[in-house]
Image (cartoon, coloured by chain):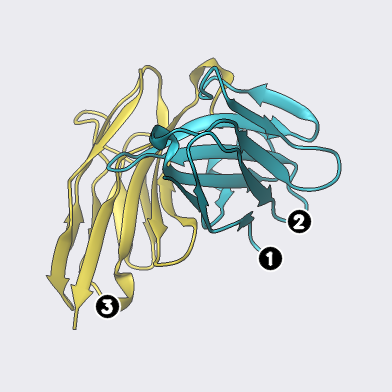
Amino acid sequence: GNSVTQMEGPVTLSEEAFLTINCTYTATGYPSLFWYVQYPGEGLQLLLKATKADDKGSNKGFEATYRKETTSFHLEKGSVQVSDSAVYFCALSDRTGGSNYKLTFGKGTLLTVNP
Amino acid sequence: NAGVMQNPRHLVRRRGQEARLRCSPMKGHSHVYWYRQLPEEGLKFMVYLQKENIIDESGMPKERFSAEFPKEGPSILRIQQVVRGDSAAYFCASSPRSGESSEAFFGQGTRLTVV
């Protein structure tokens, strides 16, 4: 079956530090990959996505590259801000079998950025 | 345009009671998905509904859980005779079209506590 493993948190950084949150996956088909973010008190929001190998998703200074050879989709940001404090979820949807509406999530990583 | 609205945000039930969780999708969205997040785990798919139809309920527990999305009104996730193991965060998402996981918008979730 499909699964997503992301680094456990919590992660605490100082403002302007470099961020990496690791994410690896296993999938029976050829998945699309996503990062979602949940700010305090809010629902999950799509942060970025990639649909094929070597694609790079980017948004708000965050980036992640779809690496098929290492089955990874690590999230990076060069300089974090206090406002980036949130829980980050890596997810995939498997496009085979007609159930690409179904997302498989990692456990989430809590990021806290201190001023 | 209001986002996906879930209520209540927090729900406390005694063992054996019924829990009813409501989800109003975004305007114009006719596809609804329910996910459950148990403590220390990622979100897990439960059920996918369109108006008046259950499309995929492969993630729903076989007993005590049911979901509906009537022609009028919100989607309801109903848990009968709750047990402590049902304590979790329940998230609803909606999308304008089927099979478009990346366009699903999530609500803030309902946190169910069974005492």
From the viewer's perspective, tell me whether residue A12 is left or right of residue B22: left
Mark 3 burial class by Cα count in 10 Å: few <14, some 14-19, many 20+: some
The spot of residue B111 in percent (x, y) is: 47, 51
* Label 2: which secondary element: loop
Instruction: State the residue position of label 2.
Output: B27
Measure the C-alpha gap from mark 3 to mark 2.
32 Å
Instruction: State the residue position of label 3.
Output: A82
- Marks 2/1 in contact by CB < 8 Å: the verdict is yes
Q: Is residue A94 above or below residue A110?
A: above
Q: Residue at x 30, y 48 (%)?
A: A108
User: Are labels 2 and 1 assigned to the same chain?
Assistant: yes
Q: Is residue A3 above or below residue A55?
A: above
The chain drawn in yellow is A
Chain of the residue displaying label 2: B
The spot of residue B113 in percent (x, y) is: 44, 48
Quarter of the image holding residue B47?
top right
- Residue A79 seen by the camera: no
* Label 3: which secondary element: helix
In the picture, the quarter occupied by the N terminus of chain B is bottom right
The spot of residue B86 in percent (x, y) is: 44, 36
Instruction: State the residue position of label 1.
Output: B2
Query: As shown in the figure, which amino acid type bears the numbered disc 3?
Result: Val
